[in-house]
Amino acid sequence: MKLVPGLQDSYNNGMFQAVRGTRDIFSPLVEEYVRLEAIARRLAAQWGFGEIRIPTFEEAGLFKRGVGETTDIVEKEMYVFEDRGERQLALRPEGTASVVRSYVENNMHQKEKNCRLFYVANMFRAERPQAGRYREFEQVGFEVFGDPGPLADAEIITLAWEIFKSFGLSDLRLSLNSIGCPECRGPYREKLETVLAQMISQLCEDCQNRHQKNPLRCLDCKKCSEKVRAQAPAFQLCAACQAHARIVEDLLGACGLTFVNDPSLVRGLDYYTRTVFEISSPVLGSQSAVCGGGRYDGLVELLGGPATPATGFALGVDRVVEARFKEKPPASPPLKEQAAFLVFVKAGPKAVEYGFGLAQRLRQKGVSVFCSSATDSIKSQMRQAGKSGAKYALMIGDDEFSKKQVLLKNLQDSSQATLSPEEVMTRLASPC
Ligand SMILES: [Zn+2]
Ligand SMILES: [Zn+2]
């Protein structure tokens, strides 16, 4: 692909700007992202999941098939491009299709009866930017392959719940539904098609086009779902699906999880089966869903693998972090007990070398040592020391260098002591 000369870009304003729908993430947000990822990884290990790193882009066809050609994600939001070899590629809009592609491609079904994978990855969708929605966003996803039973469903729901609880979210809602299997959905689909045909003029353009090809999608169309659900026939689960749903509920109860049954929770694609769930955080307002998942028994086969039951979920890291900040705004950054700020007091080159060497040895002992450029004024260095959160200032000048000493100042109570480098090392390296 050629860069088109003269094409409008934000540099025309004299500088570049982040692309619409993307953003830079700074501290203290970054620390919360890292903390959430660490919790997800710790719990993944406890639950027996192995991490998988998936590619940032795949063949566009994978998502057309794996996410669904009639979905908004694929029809309107996917970043599709042609590479230099004229292949149709797409930035991943979600993770499951890639994980399933890998599962099939690497014959994982032959290696492990019950295969459990998780990922931490950024996704890309050209959605209309709005509060809490970005075109590049992060998801953590968990997938279980090879287990058709309700226990696997209950396990992934409990795992999602545990991640949020460990992260410190307290106000959460769990909604649960079963969308049945092909057996109970077949007759329902026919009835729904008839109803949709009768109300065709009230449907949006998308639904008018897909009401025959994929009538179930009209149930979760953003524009039509309310109208359609009001007139849609009641859905009846078959006996096997009823039993499955009942066991999932009982198992969640055994872990003390409360939930609401929400019949409006649907997935309008054929490869989804039975369990569907969503976890939401009311502090986020209208865009409150932080996690969604469920069973997708038909997807592995659809993507060329052997018929394999599967269940999983993905959580939106950006929204979870936002919910956490809304529930509990961060306090001022904590004092860094094992940290010192190196302040040079009229120090010549030899004294600077002496301080620089000491800082290095302290860091090797696990102490954090920050410093300025050594050319700043003492006043400026002390101001930076205060802002850094360090508990101590290591004051070094020519006098300290010639006596091989350090003036250690406690920035909290302003007490100070002249110590040898070894004494400083002992005092800072071991927590008091
Ligand atoms: Zn069924
Ligand atoms: Zn519609």
Image (cartoon, helix red, strand yellow):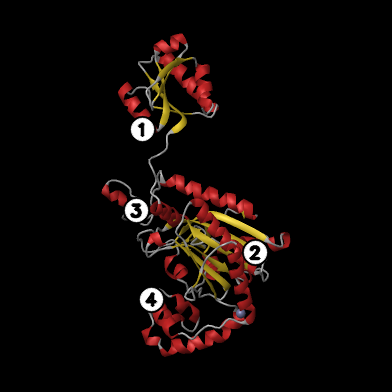
On screen, residue 350 above or below 45: above
On screen, residue 221 above or below 169: below
Read off the residue under disc 3. Answer: 5
**Can residue 151 be seen here?**
yes
Q: 96 left or right of 305?
A: left
Residue 186, position as x, y percentages in the image: 57, 84
| Residue in the image at 50% along x and 75% along y | 268
Q: Choose the circle earlier in sequence order: 1 or 2.
A: 2
Q: Choose the circle earlier in sequence order: 4 or 1.
A: 4
The one of 100 and 358 positioned closer to us in this rendering = 358
Q: Secondary structure at mark 4?
A: loop
Residue 429, position as x, y percentages in the image: 53, 26
Q: 317 left or right of 47?
A: left
| Separation of residues labelled 4 and 3 (CA atoms) | 40 Å
Read off the residue under disc 2. Answer: 145
Read off the residue under disc 1. Answer: 387
Tag of residue 223: 4
The one of 393 and 85 positioned closer to us in this rendering = 393
The one of 1 and 405 positioned closer to us in this rendering = 405
* Amino acid at pointer 2: Phe
* Amino acid at pointer 4: Lys
Q: Choose the circle earlier in sequence order: 3 or 1.
A: 3
Q: Based on the displayed image, in which of its 4 quarters is residue 119 positioned?
A: bottom right
Front tag of 1 and 2? 1
The one of 310 and 241 positioned closer to us in this rendering = 241
Tag of residue 84: none
Q: Secondary structure at mark 3?
A: loop
